[in-house]
Amino acid sequence: MMKTISLVMVGFGNVGKAFAQLILDKADLIQKEYQVEFRVTGIATTRHGIAVDPRGIDLQQALQCMQQKVSLDTLCREGVPTSMEEFVQTCPGDALLENSPVNHHTGQPAVGYIRSALMRKMHVVSANKGPVVHAYRELTDLAARQGVKYYFESAVMDGMPIFSLFRSSLPAVELRGFLGILNSTTNLILEFMEKGKSFEEAVQYAQVLGIAEADPAEDVDGWDAAIKVSALATVLMGLDFKPQQVQRQGIAHLTPRMVEEARQAGERWKLVCRARRTPQGLEASVMPQRVSSDSPLYHISGTSSYVQFETDVLAELGMMEGKPGTYTTAYGLLADLLNILQNR
Amino acid sequence: MMKTISLVMVGFGNVGKAFAQLILDKADLIQKEYQVEFRVTGIATTRHGIAVDPRGIDLQQALQCMQQKVSLDTLCREGVPTSMEEFVQTCPGDALLENSPVNHHTGQPAVGYIRSALMRKMHVVSANKGPVVHAYRELTDLAARQGVKYYFESAVMDGMPIFSLFRSSLPAVELRGFLGILNSTTNLILEFMEKGKSFEEAVQYAQVLGIAEADPAEDVDGWDAAIKVSALATVLMGLDFKPQQVQRQGIAHLTPRMVEEARQAGERWKLVCRARRTPQGLEASVMPQRVSSDSPLYHISGTSSYVQFETDVLAELGMMEGKPGTYTTAYGLLADLLNILQNR
């Protein structure tokens, strides 16, 4: 029997729009394989209006509005909510898709939206790292008490199945540590430097390509990577480990000469993430290191990323993501949703 | 509430023994996290006797028997079954752990053992590739009709979570193809050749290390890899694709000079597995190829292995296994069992 699942979307940027397109593209497959039909009952943005329609918003129209810079308010069947808070507390739905911008310092306002939705016994799926590092335990416990789920596959390495792998495929393992390359912007910048550019030129080039932000500090200072390390440690190792606790150094001090010296020694500079359980607790770091060609990190190029887990039974389990796109992150949201509906 | 699960083991070689040790080592963790207690009610070998004890065999004793070359018959509480068939049809249990030697041509006698166990409404967990390529559809359908499961995570890349990843973490993806290095013996032989050994010397060296078989043909002719390609295509792509249909070439014709020429060009010879869905069906091959340093396969060294999937939503999803051991394969069996018990 077909089941209709109502979705409430906070945020309709690149990821939100790609998700809308993805559920349009895969609607037939999802109906056939999972007997599920998605209906989006609300889409709220901070700058492009808010649409609410309990009978289901026409996603093609919503995507068109965004393209033509027409406010989503025009799709509202009922009174337009006066705030995001009101929207999250009132829009009817079975699950909240939370895709508001990341706030690394507090996780807000996303934590508040997620809490509101869980209180209303809605599942929550989010690509947002902020709430994971700032409120994972609280939100997961709240979800359990409410009989719903809070999943966030796309928070680390886009839609690659990392959290779901440990949740559903690796019972009774003991995770001892991991290493990896988790920030693709810095990986690309370092590659441009290997081709002879200065750090500043490489950043500019990455900005032109739309990969580095206008303010690249978060990436080049290692913050984004530190947050991902913290998210993995918190969720997979059960430790409450804040990004601030990650020993962190960025790549801004690297010079073309240092990059060339490494190359001559057969090595490459990489922004390496590491975490390791020790008798004293977790040791975690994000820092540029020269890696030699026998390291699995040596070969992670461009916007690819990689994480390698060390467990008691699988000594080295590596996961590589190549050629990520907006669809990759959107797929992580869809996978979370379908996994929730399958009780996985 | 604690649940006791009775296990019947066919085969007690390296993998079987490692599994016994693993469930001894992890007994406390499994009881605590899954409220499950394993009891092995039967162990059957072709050359070291058969033990049956419905109250549970002492695994330490069984391991000792094997070490001291004492027949397992001595652990039998009841009459010793006169054949493996009788054992499989009568030994009481909730799940069969099938670890008999691989038969690539027919999958027998494993297919028969698995069928018998499924008919008795027992789950089956197996590290055996033979039944996967010869009878996956039949056995999986039979299991479904009987309300039980037939899982085989360890059949490809030891205990790496490949089948469970697609089963439990990647809903609604379309798998378009994969490439990889799936046979570690040939990978090691090629590496020895890079260090200046002839093919024959490299094989001998791998034999001394206990990695290559006395008759290395199955590995060096690409058969083992072709069977793994067939298993992945059959299970993950839903195609009935036999090992014989894989275009196959081994590595025995490679000379030190060819290996050296590749090295000088910055390339390495690898036994590359490929499969790709085309409008005409599946195209699959196992053959030695020169790969350059920008290929993810270039860097897979020693006994490591690697598979990279191409899907419609995740363009490149790579899984790397490093430093495999007997525990790795045994863990795949345990993971299958626990995943079955968790309905995953």
Image (cartoon, coloured by chain):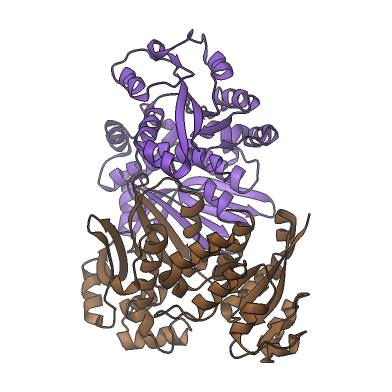
Chain colours: A purple, B brown
**Where is residue B88 shown, x and y percent of the image?**
62, 78
Q: Is residue A296 visible?
A: no
When asked about the image quadrant of residue B146, the answer is: bottom right
Number of callouts = 0
Looking at the picture, does residue A56 appear above or below residue A192?
above
Q: Is residue A94 visible?
A: yes
**Where is residue B290 shown, x and y percent of the image?**
24, 68
Left or right relative to A58: residue B150 = right
Left or right relative to B89: residue B312 = left
**Where is residue A275 shown, x and y percent of the image?**
56, 50
* Foreground pick, B81 / A67: B81
When asked about the image quadrant of residue A27, the answer is: top left
Q: Residue at x 28, y 43 (%)?
A: A192
Looking at the picture, does residue A262 appear above or below residue B217?
above
Left or right relative to A324: residue A178 = right
* Foreground pick, B315 / A60: A60
Q: Residue at x 42, y 31 (%)?
A: A217
Q: Residue at x 65, y 25 (%)?
A: A119
